[in-house]
Amino acid sequence: MRDIVEEIRRAYETVGIRLDQATTYGTYYRLLCGGCGRMVGIVGDGLLPDMAREIVSEQFDLYAAGLLGCACGHQRERTQTLDPERWQASRDRHAD
Ligand SMILES: [Zn+2]
């Protein structure tokens, strides 16, 4: 497996999202919820090193607030475990 794909996989893993098999074309990977397996998006493997981690980090607030990710709440729980302080701050900011 290519390094960049492994990097993308690890980045999404931190917030409770699994990388599925490559699509037929091999340039896009489905993102599956680590809790219930539902598809929550796709990601291309054309990212540059460190980009996947930055994207996931930027999306942290949205996962924490439940505005992004799966309806089952798995990403919300994972982000809470990952960084409770940032999680709470995100919740407060998006409460109103
Ligand atoms: Zn789910």
Image (tube, rainbow, N blue to C red):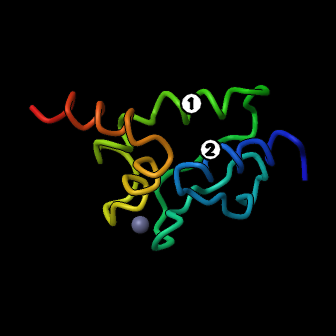
Relative to 68, residue 53 above or below: above
Would residue 96 appear left or right of 76 to someone viewing this image? left
Q: Amino acid at mark 2?
A: Val
Residue 44, horizontal then vertical, whole percent: 68, 41
Considering depth in this image, is 77 or 25 the residue closer to the camera? 77
**Residue farthest to the left?**
96
Considering depth in this image, is 87 or 55 the residue closer to the camera? 87
Helix, strand or loop at disc 1? helix
Would residue 87 appear left or right of 53 to someone viewing this image? left
Q: Quadrant of residue 92?
A: top left
Residue 26, horizontal then vertical, whole percent: 79, 52
Task: Tell me the residue at 29%/30% (across/down).
Answer: 89
Query: Which residue in the protein does label 2 denote?
Result: 43
Residue 27, horizontal then vertical, whole percent: 75, 46
**Residue farthest to the front?**
85
Which badge, 1 or 2, is on the more N-terminal residue? 2
> What crowding class fits label 2: few (fewer than 14 Cα within 10 Å), some (14-19), or many (20 or more)?
some
Considering depth in this image, is 66 or 38 the residue closer to the camera? 66
Helix, strand or loop at disc 2? strand
* Labelled pair 1, 2 in contact (Cβ < 8 Å): no
Would residue 91 appear left or right of 48 to someone viewing this image? left
Task: Tell me the residue at 52%/50% (across/down).
Answer: 15
Query: Which residue in the protein does label 1 denote?
Result: 55
Image quadrant occupied by the C terminus: top left
Relative to 88, residue 32 above or below: below
Of labels 1 and 2, the one closer to you: 1
Q: Amino acid at mark 1?
A: Ile
Residue 79, horizontal then vertical, whole percent: 44, 47
Would residue 33 appear left or right of 4 to someone viewing this image? left
Task: Tell me the residue at 73%/64% (across/down).
Answer: 21
Q: CA distance from mark 1 to mark 2?
A: 11 Å
